[in-house]
Image (spheres, grey):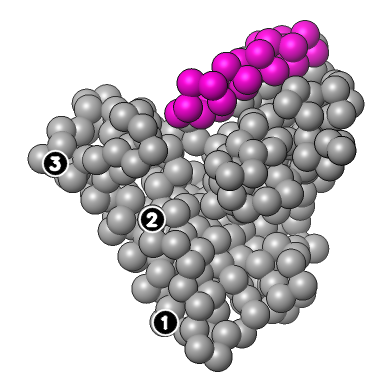
Amino acid sequence: MTEARELLAVAAEAAAAGAAVLAEREDVAPSGRVLRSDESGLGTKSSESDLVTDFDRRSEQAVRAVIGRRRPQDAITGEEYGTSTPERASGIRWSIDPLDGTTNFVRGIVYYGTSVAVQGPDGDWLAGVVHAPALDRLWWASRGAGAFTGRASAARPGADDAGQTGVDRLTGPQGTRAAGLLSTGFGYDAARREQQVSAVVELLNSFGNLRRLGAAALDICMVADGTVEAYAEYGIQEHDWAAGALIAEEAGVTMRRPLAADGAAHPDWCIAGDLGVPHEQLRPAPRETRP
């Protein structure tokens, strides 16, 4: 427990460093205005719609700098720079998404943030922080100590969480599915997207409506805080779900993590909350139900 709380403090500092880079967007262009390529170093990865910017890269560098200074023997896996493992590794590994919601970020839509999670030698996720600078919102959790949210500019994760002014303990959705919202996302590949759309159409029979906000980490955190009733997406990467999944679990939300870290090579369902249908009925079927 003590180690998890100490790791939470590092995660919060690292996420704040990454989010501070993202906050520089307001110096370049106000929210609501699309960034030009000369303002952001805009490029693409797997497709024309899979965007990357200098902000993604600089944010990850800032996150890595904090972890490297505070925890030099830990391994780090990041979206932009892969995995780095020290010579005398501690067994602790960090999973970071420096800019979850890059498309939103480029287009001036405020749903984006930095996600930082840490995993112990036994595979348990120990701490996670999601920092959304444009919303001034922070979500965080450490294993066995609950999940919380508060203003990013004021909250101090790990420092008497429940006793801080303006900090709320998360307890998950309180409404019904029939009147509630299902949150999801869609991939960049057309064939993958077709599968996702077909599955979501079926799931919507259990919900009042659908939201697609464009940032998986924030989506999962919004199940934890009760903004939406459930989240389901097929084929996302570990860095997308790592921090949010622990936050949701510590809020008392049922969480299903993908079996593999690489959601491109080994696509699987990531689910937060109650979908109203057995997981084995999902299409494509979850990996553990396949022969």
Residue linked to disc 2: 80
Q: Position of residue 168 (x, y in %)?
A: 66, 47
Which quadrant would residue 284 be assigned to in this image?
Answer: top right
Residue linked to disc 1: 69
The amino acid type, in three-letter code, at marker 2 is Glu
Q: Is residue 223 left or right of residue 279?
A: left
The amino acid type, in three-letter code, at marker 1 is Arg
Query: Looking at the rendered structure, which numbered label has been put on residue 39?
Result: 3
The amino acid type, in three-letter code, at marker 3 is Glu
Task: Identify whether 185 is placed above or below 258.
Answer: above
| Label 1 neighbour load within 10 Å: few <14, some 14-19, many 20+ | few
> Could you tell me which secondary element the residue under label 1 belongs to?
helix
> Could you tell me which secondary element the residue under label 3 belongs to?
helix
Q: Position of residue 232 (x, y in %)?
A: 68, 30
Viewer-proximal residue among 151 and 25? 25
Q: Position of residue 33 (x, y in %)?
A: 22, 26
Which quadrant would residue 48 be assigned to in this image?
Answer: top left
Which residues, given as a range, are shown in magenta?
185-209
Residue 199 falls inside the magenta stretch: yes
Q: Residue at coordinates 50% horizontally, 78% vertically from top-left?
A: 85
Tag 2 near tag 3, CB within 8 Å? no
Tag 1 near tag 2, CB within 8 Å? no
Q: Of label 1 and label 3, which has the lower sequence position?
A: 3
